[in-house]
Image (cartoon, rainbow, N blue to C red):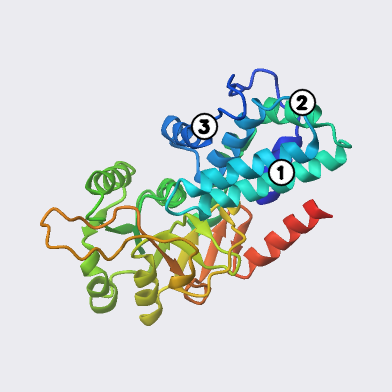
């Protein structure tokens, strides 16, 4: 789903049988954090930006008729509250920022009629999620041809966009390519699940620990390309993704292996980090302890700069990292125009 598609989703008229998520509590009692988490738990196909948008749509169902400014203040306050509830707010902020911009634009077009905008959003709310799934399929269609017969793809994490791309390639190539899957030692069940799913597609998969990536790519020369997903794509074309992505990208660059990122455009975020220390949020990666029970953080991420990324594979096609800035400028410029 393109970023403009997210805005268009709220403008289209859809059939009345689409389900509407309704909540009866007042906005002051509305729990945006709980709503967001329940949406992600109940629908594994939802991405974080779309779940954030759906949470705000549910919020609007609790807001009584009021002024435009009060409405916007309510949405802003709940967006801030939601961002503060997670360690890495960038993915969901991509969604809340876009929704807020769309809401401002819609209220202007409706000459301040909040009720009209609210009812339209409630009728069409599920279209956001449906388009997110469609976007993932679009990523697969745009990127599967990179995987040629006899090639070997290295990946890690549990990106649904990457899995969908590989599934699409498997259908066209009858599984005549291989995958090296980098296991995450902090997420054993997730790694097992991804490997099982890929093998059920008929794809031969070799599992390696994170420490073996340089050996496999640099010494064995067994990898032809790297394809990873992203939690968010930053304004300069870099990505925030599962920790370990940055070092894989560095290794790929060193041995001149293409490094592709499969990501839907609604993950594009208006954030411009300068380096690893400029993510805008804190995470506890180093935990010096003498306690034997101390564990490595499971949700840590890192930042991969655009100079290490060969191409972004989106539902709009394959683009260089600079495409992100152009897309965000186009969308936010039109919404603010």
Q: Residue at x 62, y 43 (%)?
A: 77
The tag on residue 65 is 2
> How crowded is the residue under tag 3: few (<14 C-alpha within 10 Å), some, or many (20+)?
some
Going from N to C along the chain, the mark reached first, 3 or 1, is 1
Q: Residue furthest front?
A: 28
Secondary element type, mark 3: loop
- Which of these two is toward me, 19 or 92? 92
Q: Where's residue 192, x and y in %?
A: 24, 45
Secondary element type, mark 1: helix
Q: Are discs 1 and 2 less than 8 Å apart at CB?
A: no
Q: Nearer the viewer, mark 1 or mark 2?
A: 2
Say which residue label 1 marks. Answer: 7
Going from N to C along the chain, the mark reached first, 1 or 2, is 1
Q: Against 2, is 220 above or below?
A: below
- Which of these two is toward me, 264 or 146? 264
Q: Quadrant of the C terminus?
A: bottom right
Q: Against 220, is 17 above or below?
A: above
Spatial separation of the CA atoms under disc 1 and disc 2 = 22 Å
The tag on residue 272 is none
> How crowded is the residue under tag 1: few (<14 C-alpha within 10 Å), some, or many (20+)?
many
Q: Residue at x 31, y 46 (%)?
A: 194
Q: Where's residue 135, x and y in %?
A: 58, 45
Q: Is residue 242 left or right of residue 210?
A: right
Q: Where's residue 147, x and y in %?
A: 43, 60
Q: Are discs 3 and 1 less than 8 Å apart at CB?
A: no
Q: Against 126, is 311 above or below?
A: below
Spatial separation of the CA atoms under disc 2 and disc 3 = 19 Å
Number of dots carrying numbers: 3
Say which residue label 3 marks. Answer: 31
Q: Is residue 148 left or right of residue 126?
A: left
Spatial separation of the CA atoms under disc 3 and disc 1 = 24 Å
């Amino acid at each position: 789903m393109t970023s403009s598609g997210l805005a268009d989703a709220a403008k289209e008229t859809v059939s009345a049988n689409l389900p509407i998520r309704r909540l009866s509590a007042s906005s002051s009692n509305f729990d945006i954090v709980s709503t967001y988490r329940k949406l992600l738990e109940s629908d594994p196909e939802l991405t974080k930006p779309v779940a954030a948008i759906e949470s705000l749509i549910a919020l609007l169902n609790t807001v009584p008729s009021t002024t435009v400014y009060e409405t916007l203040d309510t949405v802003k306050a709940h967006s801030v509250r939601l961002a503060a509830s997670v360690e890495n707010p960038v993915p969901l902020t991509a969604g809340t920022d876009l929704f807020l911009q769309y809401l401002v634009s819609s209220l202007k077009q409706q000459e301040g009629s909040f009720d009209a905008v609210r009812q339209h959003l409630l009728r069409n709310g599920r279209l956001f999620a449906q388009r997110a799934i469609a976007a993932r399929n679009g990523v697969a269609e745009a990127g599967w041809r990179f995987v040629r017969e006899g090639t070997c793809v290295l990946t890690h994490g549990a990106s649904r966009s990457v899995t969908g791309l590989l599934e699409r390639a498997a259908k066209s190539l009858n599984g005549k390519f291989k995958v090296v899957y980098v296991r995450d030692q902090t997420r054993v069940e997730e790694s097992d699940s991804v490997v099982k799913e890929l093998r059920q597609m008929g794809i031969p998969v070799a599992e390696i620990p994170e420490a073996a990536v340089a050996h496999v790519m640099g010494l064995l020369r067994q990898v032809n390309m790297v394809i990873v997903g992203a939690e968010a794509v930053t304004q300069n074309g870099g990505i925030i993704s599962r920790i370990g992505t940055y070092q894989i990208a560095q290794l790929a660059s060193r041995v001149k292996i293409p490094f592709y990122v499969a990501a839907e455009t609604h993950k594009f975020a208006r954030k411009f980090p300068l380096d690893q220390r400029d993510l805008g949020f804190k995470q506890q990666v180093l935990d010096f302890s003498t306690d034997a029970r101390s564990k490595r953080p499971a949700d840590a991420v890192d930042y991969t700069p655009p100079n290490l990324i060969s191409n972004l594979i989106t539902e709009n096609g394959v683009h260089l990292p600079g495409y992100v800035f152009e897309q965000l400028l186009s969308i936010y410029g039109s919404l603010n125009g």
